[in-house]
Amino acid sequence: MTRPDGLPDAANYDTGIDAVLIAAPGAPDRLTVALAALNGRIVARLDWPAGFGDHATPQVIVVEAGGVDPAIIAEHLPGIVDQAVRMQAGLVVAMGVDEIDVVAAATLGGSTRLLVDPTVGDCVAAIVVAAEAARMPAGVFDFHRETDGTRLERLNTEVARIAEALARLTRAEIEGDAPAAPIVGDRTNRYGAPPALVEPSAADVRRAIRARRLRDQFFGATLFEDPGWDMLLDLYAAELERGRVSVSSLCIAAAVAPTTALRWIARMTDTGLFERRPDLLDRRRAFMVLSDRASEAMRGYIVATRGADLRIP
């Protein structure tokens, strides 16, 4: 059985969480309800324009950004982020889809938990994770975060290593210095002009993206979720086109729920594959780009697939 707020009937936790709540008058009460369900103590409740001030050190700072003027968020959220870092407090920010870009311009990754149109249950989970992370002494192994981060880093490293090896083999074959001697039937090919090494094109990458979305039309949008790869493809295509991708646009490219997409963007940023670049003309927005390492890995992978007469998956 569940309650109207989406929590189990027996949801009555004793977490001892002290929180600072930042929300405008009339804001959604999902964070307040979540803290109440956790028996959390709101040591200070502040309006957005109000100064942060000195309060009892909280384990977590929870921010309701839904419906707040983007200019107010852009002005005050960076200070809230700095305050959370100074206090070594976890930070949870709830928002709507319209606030994704302005919130992401101020904070993304690290110890911040971003929630888009969350349920009360989503808020409960994020607050607990943020508070527990804040309680953990510096340098102590965080099982859940370290497991996810290590696994993703290992996967990305392995993909890059395989792509580099394939690209190296492809170049060796084209240049005629493959280590293995050709069989008799292949020797005549050594004297012909080698095929050109085809550089990746944005059109090829966009075709791969369209094929992936076409697959979803026949098998459903959730069966083959792969947001990390979808975002890598989108950012690489934008790089080849010399275009710019906002955080909200990248969330759409991920083809998953916005909260899930933001979590993946944070992971890919923390592992050094994505980089956030501020919009110099509008501080309420930031753009995402591939890091040099990720860009080179994508190029090597795509060149290798083309050299092996394969399609980009």
Image (spheres, rainbow, N blue to C red):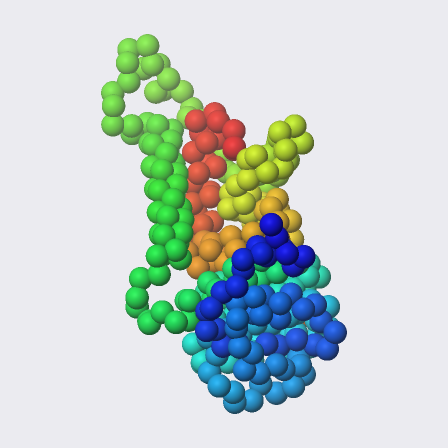
Q: What residue do we see at 61% from left, 60% from top? A: 120
Q: In this view, does 44 lie to the left or right of 173?
A: right
Q: Is residue 10 left or right of residue 210?
A: left
When the figure is inspected, residue 277 is found, relative to residue 166, above or below; the finding is below
- Can residue 16 be seen from the camera position used here? yes
Q: In this view, does 118 lie to the left or right of 56?
A: right
Count of numbered circles on the image: 0
Dividing the picture into quadrants, the one containing residue 77 is bottom right
- Can residue 118 be seen from the camera position used here? no
Q: What residue do we see at 35% from left, 61% from top? A: 142
When the figure is inspected, residue 177 is found, relative to residue 115, above or below; the finding is above
Residue 181 in the image, given as x and y percentages of width and height: 25, 20
When the figure is inspected, residue 74 is found, relative to residue 250, above or below; the finding is below
Q: Which of 248 and 293 is in front in this view?
A: 248
Residue 18 in the image, given as x and y percentages of width and height: 49, 77
Residue 39 in the image, given as x and y percentages of width and height: 53, 71
Residue 233 in the image, given as x and y percentages of width and height: 55, 43
When the figure is inspected, residue 9 is found, relative to residue 161, above or below; the finding is below
Q: Which of 99 and 127 is in front in this view?
A: 127
Q: What residue do we see at 64% from left, 65% from top? A: 30
